[in-house]
Image (cartoon, rainbow, N blue to C red):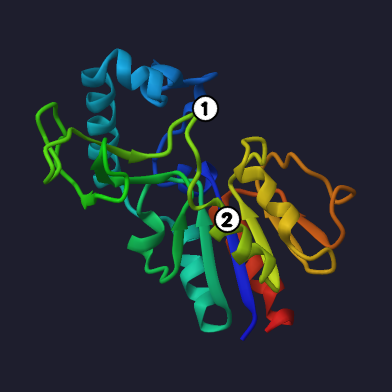
Amino acid sequence: MKTLVVLSGAGMSAESGVKTFRDAGGLWEGHDVMKVASPEGWQANKELVLDFYNQRRKQLLSVAPNAGHTGLVDLEQYFSIKIITQNIDDLHERAGSSDVLHLHGELLKVRSTRYEKDILNWKKDLVLGDMCENGYQLRPHIVWFGEQVPMLPKAAEEVQKADILLVIGTSMQVYPAASLIHYIERRKPIFFIDPKPTIGEADFPNLTIIPKSATEGVTELKEILKQFR
């Protein structure tokens, strides 16, 4: 069974109603992203940051996976699917995907501000005074701007082993995540699903662009991939 590695971004979840700060000129739900998604923002106003993610968590729990998510699950009948997502939602998992790596953290988890590996599942509001078992404040389990991306080496390994690479719903403009496309062997096929593709077929050998939304693009891709089974 061939391995299909998927790099997914905000466009993957947009049709489910999950908003992205890039939809609003650098504002995320009306907030300057650096005030709610950076270590400096956290130090300046912890209550603002916690409230922001509490609202994002509530929004996430009110939406459902879309046909793009479930379409990738359908492909598990024919391929070993490895999903590497920049998204902090759990829609891939809720759709039924069995192997998901989150580059930028997970909205439904929190972690200790002192011990990074002390991670808890969390669906309720997180407030000041919520502590880890060692007595340190809990924070969103999110990789903020300016922080290291600890899962990047593992993601690069997965892309290197891919037989087919799918890039879907991401601008390929945010580093270091955007660098992952360069890890696939040059002879291996790459598919890029995005209504406004930011790379062209001249940029990568064996690149096929599907200029559609996630739901429409995955439907088309399923037909194309029949030749690779």
Which residue is tagged 1?
Answer: 23
> Compared with residue 68, is residue 127 higher up or lower down, i.e. above or below?
above
Classify residue 166 as left or right of residue 14.
Answer: right
Classify residue 73 as left or right of residue 222.
Answer: left
Classify residue 220 as left or right of residue 39.
Answer: right
Q: Residue at x 65, y 63 (%)?
A: 159
- Secondary structure beneath dot 2 equals helix
Q: Which mark is drawn over residue 219?
A: none
Per the model, the C-alpha gap separating discs 2 and 1 is 29 Å
Amino acid type for the residue under numbered disc 2: Pro
Q: Residue at x 70, y 69 (%)?
A: 164
Amino acid type for the residue under numbered disc 1: Asp
Classify residue 153 as left or right of residue 69.
Answer: right
In percent of width and height, residue 122 lies at 19, 47
> For the N terminus, which image quadrant?
bottom right
> For the C terminus, which image quadrant?
bottom right
How many numbered marks, from 0 up?
Answer: 2
Does the image show residue 29? no
Q: Earlier in the sequence, mark 2 or mark 1?
A: 1
In percent of width and height, residue 56 lies at 30, 34
Mark 2–mark 1 contact, CB under 8 Å? no
Closest to the observer: 150 or 90?
Answer: 150
Which residue is tagged 2?
Answer: 153
Badge 2 local density, few (<14 within 10 Å), some, or many (20+)?
Answer: few
